[in-house]
Image: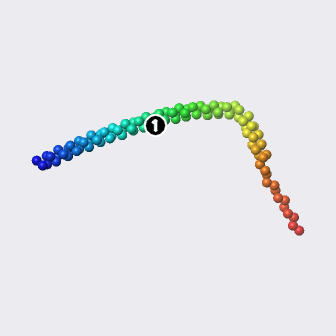
Amino acid sequence: MNTLIQADIFFFITAIAVVLGTGAFLVASWYVIQILRDVREISTKAKNAAGKLEVDFETLRTDLKHKGTKVGSIADMILAFIASWIPHPKKKKAEKTM
């Protein structure tokens, strides 16, 4: 008779543990689902931004093809202007020895 009471206590404790474990699993699953929804939203926004960026780069590439020589001459002019401000080191004359 004593073992029957021990078995009932064991099954009662096991049933409570299963109910609590299931509740904890459901709560954790709810948070995981929310996180996955946020990740999906972020990845969708990133994909859209990447598409827009691709269009911008294509536009820039087309503009550079059409105006490449103009941009190159302006860049050369700016670099020449900056180079004129940089002092050049003077060469030392070789000393004459007698």
Residue lying furthest left? 1
- Residue 3 lies left or right of residue 76; in this view the side is left
Residue at the outermost bottom position = 98
Residue 38 occupies quadrant: top left
| Residue 3 position in % (x across, y down) | 14, 48
Name which residue lies at 20% across and 44% down: 11
Looking at the rendering, in which quadrant would you find the C terminus? Answer: bottom right
Residue 91 higher or lower than 80, as above or below: below
Q: How is the image coloured?
A: rainbow
Q: Is residue 35 left or right of residue 15?
A: right
Residue beneath the point at 84% across and 59% down: 93
Q: Where is residue 5 in the image (x, y as percent from the top left)?
A: 14, 46
Residue for badge 1: 39
Which amino acid type is marked by label 1?
Answer: Val
Provide residue 87's location: percent of width, then percent of height: 78, 50
Q: What element carries label 1?
A: helix
Residue 3 vs residue 97, the one in the foreground: 3
Residue drawn at 28 percent across, 41 percent down: 20
Above or below, 95 against 2 in this view is: below
Residue visible at 29% across and 42% down?
21
